[in-house]
Image (cartoon, rainbow, N blue to C red):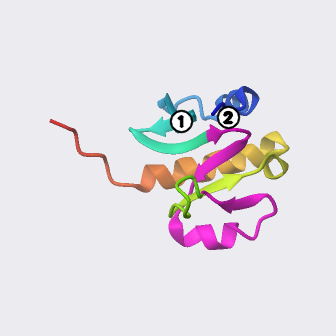
Amino acid sequence: MAYDKKIAEQIREVLPPTTHIEERKMFGGIAFLLDGKMSVGVLNDVLVARVAPEDAEKLLSTKGVRPMDFTGRPMKGFLYVEQEAISTKAALKKWVDRSLSYTKSLPQKKKKR
């Protein structure tokens, strides 16, 4: 699978400059990781957003948002956000900021030995 490089570049443009983000190819797309944890990404031509699971249900009522079902069943706390829902820079920034905020709230990953 490929990913939309234009969306990836737009994500880079709205990321806060002081945030240390690692980019990694994942699932045939690209993921933006904060402290080693996936925050947002692009798969094909959709944004993948990591959100608080308790917020996901409410966000699903947003036009262009659907559960991330990459594995054949919905993945808790991950949403696909279609281009119609991120058609402006402000809309994309809102999704990126929401995902970064949630990712920052997660516990630190344990280092592998």
Q: Position of residue 34 (x, y in %)?
A: 46, 39
**55 in relation to 106, above or below:** below
Q: Which residue is mark 2?
A: 11
Q: Position of residue 108 (x, y in %)?
A: 31, 48
* Magenta-colored stretch includes residue 50: yes
- Residue 31 at x, y = what percent? 54, 36
Q: Which mark is residue 32?
A: 1
Q: Where residue 66 is drawn, which disc sits there? A: none
Are the residues flagged by discs 2 and 1 in contact, CB closer than 8 Å? yes
Q: Which residues are magenta?
A: 42-68
Upstream in sequence: badge 2 or badge 1: 2
Q: Where, quadrant-wise, is the C terminus in this rendering?
A: top left
Could you give the CA–CA distance between mark 2 and mark 1, rounded to whole angstroms?
A: 9 Å
| Callout 1 secondary element | strand
Circle 2 Cα neighbour tier, 10 Å, few/some/many (<14 / 14–19 / ≥20): many
How many neighbours does mark 1 have within 10 angstroms: few (below 14), some (14-19), or many (20 or more)? many
